[in-house]
Amino acid sequence: MTTFKITYATMSAQSDELHQAFDVALGRVREELGEHHPIYINHEPRWSAETFPDISPINTNWVLGHFQKGSRQDAKDAIAAAKAAFHGWSHTPWQERVSLLRRAADLISERRYDIAALMSLEVGKNRLESLGDVEETADLIRYYCQMMEDNHGFDRPMGQLSPNEKTRSVLRPYGVWVVISPFNFPFALAGGPAGGALVAGNTVVFKPASDTPYTGLKLYEIFRDAGLPAGVFNFITGPGGTVGDELVSNPDVSGVTFTGSYQVGFDIFRHFSVKHPRPCIAEMGGKNPVIVSRHADLEEAAEGVMRSAFGLQGQKCSAASRVYIERPVKEKFTGLLLEKTRKIVIGDPSQRDVYLGPVINRNAYNNFQEYTEIARRDGEVLHGGTTLTEGDLAQGYFVAPTIVDRLPKDHAFFYDELFLPIVSLATVDSLDEAMQRANDSLYGLTAGFYSEDKDEINWFLDNIEAGVVYVNRRAGATTGAWPGVQPFGGWKGSGSTGKSGGGLYYVQQYMHEQSQTIVE
């Protein structure tokens, strides 16, 4: 079979071969649904007294599987297993760790269609977004392996104060690392952080979001089958109030990577360090602006905004959620955006021609109804604003992509992360006004700009307060970062470290420095 490279920037594939492979994988996945799955600690399956069902948001009658409602004790045992395995794993030569992690990345690529098909059913992602998520995971792991190689295991000679002494700077792993992943990128935002922690020499306890335990289980199987020793990577499911709380409060945990809401992430960040500082890598969402200049290619701008606002039903921390358009082009831009949005195909996202699937769960579905009622009250809904209940859509959490205009400048929709397919438009009289409003945010994750004027582009890059910025990007105004191409991380309330996933400085966060001086 031909090898295809799917990224978020392409998000299109006319290859019949690719779609045929996905359809075959979808059939295999459907045959395995409904089974009971354990927690894995030290490579040993563990069953709990209680389980919870994994329900597809496409059709709530589809039970994908049953997973263990892990306990606080299960979390303690997973941490203990990781702690016991740490000495052996951390003292494994980094070249051997790299070899094992590269094997894991290759397994991901080999199994990408099955994993993507499952993800489509579990998350509600369309097939190309799902394939992109899986491919990104493999590339994240490969990139972190490359960083270890390019930096010689982060072991470097330093200067000398006398001829008879030798000094080195060595980065060493911390110990047990907890990875808590979100539902929207259940593979990339689990496998990426886990890969960084593991290649650096840490052991990992991994807790997936409760909406996406099945995809998380597939990640565990990848690392197990790649040959990681027992205890190096542990998989646990269960409530955040018990399992999650134990993972971020247990003193034997050395570091944590959390991806999710600002409220939860910042709470972890504030309370994670107790007796001494502990590293906390928190990616906490965004309220991502797009600025459209009067000198923009409006066709390009409308396409980029539509893709970023409504890809994955707006449930990306990088989604375009507010657009500031200069007055002379506001009407034309809005018309183009509406035209493109009306053409979006909505339905079962595992099917070839569907772009927009359901939102993740009942809570998101209810929030959409609440927010769109507010939009109608305080502004004008230009498109959408409704739940979709025709035919098969009635069995899932389907909503219409929604465009809102004429909201007050200080409206909450310009400040609060909604995490839904809702985008708010605003008219501005100058780019300076647009920039002021774009930067007036708790968040600083991604941002987009459209202009054909080089001076305006340089002005945007010099003034925008965000960690990931795009200019004139048709493939996505604010979305679509790729490992080794666009490092992904946020400023202000969007991120805790200032270092970005898939970038040059990410792996180093999973290690601390030791200066070694030997006098001969």
Image (tube, rainbow, N blue to C red):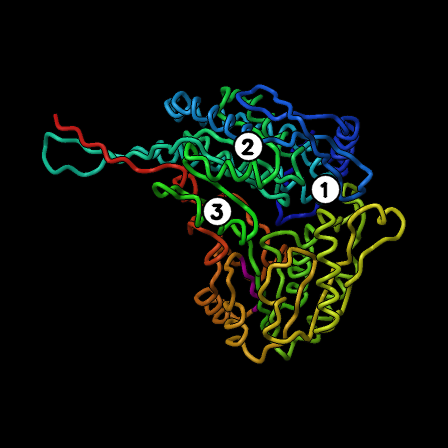
Between circles 1 and 2, the one closer to the viewer is: 2
Mark 2 or 3, closer to the camera: 2
Q: Where is residue 517, by image quadrant?
A: top left
- In the rendered image of this protein, does residue 111 appear above or below residue 349? above
Residue 243 position (above or below residue 42):
below
- For the record, the magenta segment spans 446-451
The amino acid sitting under disc 1 is Arg
Name the magenta segment's main secondary structure: strand
The residue lying at 52 percent from left, 40 percent from top is 245
115 in the magenta segment: no
Q: CA distance from mark 1 to mark 2?
A: 36 Å
- Helix, strand or loop at disc 2? helix
One can see residue 136 in this view: no
Q: Residues within 10 Å of mark 3 (few under 14, many from 20)?
A: many
3D distance between C-alphas at marks 1 and 3 = 33 Å
Residue 271 place in picture, x, y as percent: 44, 47
Looking at the rendered structure, the secondary structure element under dot 3 is: helix
Q: How many marks?
A: 3
The residue depicted at 63 percent of the width and 73 percent of the height is: 426
In the figure, 323 relative to 103: above or below? below
> Where 42 sits versus 308, above or below?
above
Which residue is labeled 1 in the image? 127
The residue beneath circle 3 is 268
The quarter of the rendered structure image containing the C terminus is top left
Q: Is residue 235 visible?
A: yes
- Label ID, residue 72: 2
